[in-house]
């Protein structure tokens, strides 16, 4: 993730940069952060490099204000996720006009900022990836969000993918489980785990994935599976409500 902080108040910029670094550590997500002291400084850099995943943007700045910068970016066709940072709520309606990801009031709440960055991460691309070796010896590069289920099969694992296809890889079930993003997956059976974003229906004995595939749920692991499922969708709904 490459995240830009645009704020002409150095202490506020440092605080936001620290929060972003903390979010990256919590998500196990590599983060590159750059601070820009003005809208003009960000625009100058933007003309050379548009490869950013989110912009934390103060509205009230000397020279070009943050709202004007946001309008300029949208006029140029950019869909860059913008999170406005301000001490006043008066600009909220204007934030909707430029399709801001969210609007945070100072002092910025760390948890709310983390939720916004989680949404920006989902919008930015495929997210964390797995590099695995198939049974035939080929290298498989797989975005974690495309992984619907993992099944332990003897000394290897079988992967069910979001498009309904499957693959068998040499990695052990335990080793593969340890590489997955926390909160995105849950082990529902001794030999299975599922990607929560791909669960269509959860029952006490089986899970139905979006592809229609059925995955068994053990009696012992049902309570934790149910809690993880509810927590995942509550978080998703909460983040949508902040838009």
Image (tube, rainbow, N blue to C red):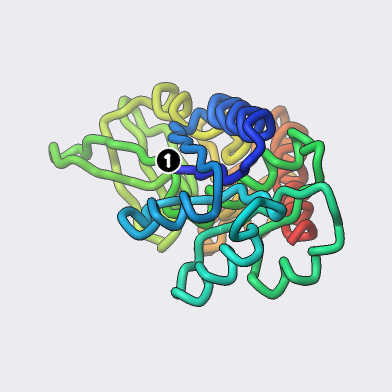
* Residue located at (67% from left, 49% from top): 58
67 and 174: which is toward the camera: 67
Specify whether 81 is left or right of 86: left
Image vertical order of residue 173 relative to residue 159, above or below: above
User: Element under label 1?
Assistant: loop
Question: Percent x, y for residue 63?
Answer: 60, 57
Judged from this view, the residue extending furthest toward the left is 137
* Quadrant in the picture for the N terminus: top left
* Residue located at (72% from left, 36% from top): 222
Q: Is residue 188 visible?
A: no
Q: How many marks?
A: 1
* Residue located at (52% from left, 70% from top): 72
Q: Residues within 10 Å of mark 1 (few under 14, many from 20)?
A: some
Q: Is residue 22 visible?
A: yes
* Residue located at (38% from left, 51% from top): 45
203 and 55: which is toward the camera: 55
Question: Percent x, y for residue 41?
Answer: 46, 49
Query: Mark 1 highlights which residue?
Result: 128
Question: Percent x, y for residue 135?
Answer: 20, 37
Specify whether 177 is left or right of 63: left
Judged from this view, the residue extending furthest toward the front is 63
Question: Percent x, y for residue 196?
Answer: 61, 47
204 and 145: which is toward the camera: 145
117 and 233: which is toward the camera: 117
* Quadrant in the picture for the C terminus: bottom right
């Amino acid at each position: 993730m490459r995240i830009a902080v645009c704020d002409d108040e150095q202490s506020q910029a440092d605080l936001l940069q620290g929060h972003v670094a903390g979010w990256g550590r919590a998500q196990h997500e590599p983060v590159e952060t750059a601070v820009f002291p003005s809208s003009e400084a960000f625009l100058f850099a933007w003309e050379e490099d548009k490869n950013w995943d989110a912009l934390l943007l103060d509205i009230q700045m000397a020279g070009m204000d943050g709202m004007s910068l946001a309008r300029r970016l949208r006029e140029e066709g950019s869909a860059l996720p913008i999170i406005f940072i301000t001490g006043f709520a008066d600009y909220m309606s204007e934030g909707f006009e430029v399709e801001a990801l969210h609007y945070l009031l100072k002092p910025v709440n760390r948890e709310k900022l983390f939720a916004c960055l989680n949404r920006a991460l989902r919008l930015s691309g495929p997210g964390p990836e797995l590099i695995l070796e198939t049974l035939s010896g080929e290298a498989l590069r797989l975005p974690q969000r495309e992984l619907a289920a993992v099944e332990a099969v003897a000394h290897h694992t079988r992967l069910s993918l979001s498009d309904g296809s499957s693959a068998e890889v040499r990695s052990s079930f335990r080793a593969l489980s340890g590489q997955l993003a926390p909160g995105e997956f849950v082990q529902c059976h001794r030999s299975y785990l599922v990607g929560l974003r791909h669960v269509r229906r959860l029952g006490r004995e089986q899970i139905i994935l979006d592809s229609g595939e059925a995955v068994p749920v053990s009696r012992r692991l049902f309570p934790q599976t149910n809690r993880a499922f509810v927590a995942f969708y509550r978080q998703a709904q909460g983040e949508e409500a902040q838009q």
